[in-house]
Amino acid sequence: MFDYSEIAETANEILAEYGQAVTLTRIVPGTYNPATGGMTGASTSTQTGWGAVFEYINKNIDGTLIQSGDKQLLLSAINSAGTALTAPIINDTVTIGGVVMTITQIKPLSPAGTTVLFDCNLRTI
């Protein structure tokens, strides 16, 4: 059986060397408390990793799923600490070079159930 975790490590090394640092942020808004009129249980979590951003070619921009100005992010499945990156979800944000973008689509590359990287669509907020 082929060990895809080695491929994930290789992809991480390539993205670390030739890509750039990525900060992935998830905001959980919490729940509304009618007694206080405010939100409770809100939280923000961040993790860092490596990725490479690409422009879409015009034939891939359909105006709905992929819009003009969107970018493609190939995101390592391994975080900067060398452990598994918590999988991104739609509406997480990524900060790359000071620019904050929202994830609108995610396609994990997971041969045999081992995630090697995440193919994400980014949209500027």
Image: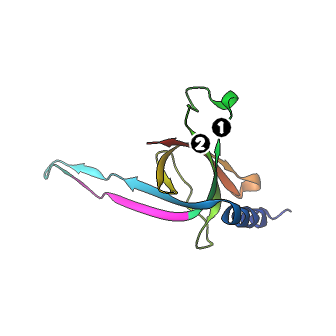
Quick one: SS at disc 2? strand
110 sits to left or right of 68: right
**Can you say which quadrant of the picture contains the C terminus?**
top left
Number of the label disc, if any, that sits on residue 71? 2
Number of the label disc, if any, that sits on residue 2? none
- Most common SS among magenta residues: strand
**Can you say which quadrant of the picture contains the N terminus?**
bottom right
Which is nearer the eye, 7 or 48? Answer: 48
Quick one: SS at disc 1? loop
As for residue 40 lying within the magenta part, the answer is yes
Q: Amino acid at mark 2?
A: Lys
Badge 1: how crowded within 10 Å, few (<14), some, or many (20+)?
A: some
Which residue ends up furthest to the left in the rendered image?
35
Question: Distance between the Cα atoms at labels 1 and 2?
Answer: 6 Å
- Vertical position of residue 10 compared to residue 104: above or below: below
Residue under the point 28% across and 50% down: 31
Which residue ends up furthest to the right in the rendered image?
1
Q: Amino acid at mark 1?
A: Tyr
* Location of residue 17 in the rendering, given as x and y in whole percent from the top left corner: 70, 66
Which residue ends up furthest to the front in the rendered image?
97
Circles 1, 2 touching at the beta carbon (< 8 Å): yes
Badge 2: how crowded within 10 Å, few (<14), some, or many (20+)?
A: many
Q: How is the image coloured?
A: rainbow
Residue under the point 15% across and 49% down: 37
> Which residues make up the magenta segment?
39-48
Which mark sits nearer the N-terminus, 1 or 2? 1
Number of the label disc, if any, that sits on residue 56? 1
* Location of residue 48 in the rendering, given as x and y in whole percent from the top left corner: 53, 65
* Location of residue 91 in the rendering, given as x and y in whole percent from the top left corner: 46, 45
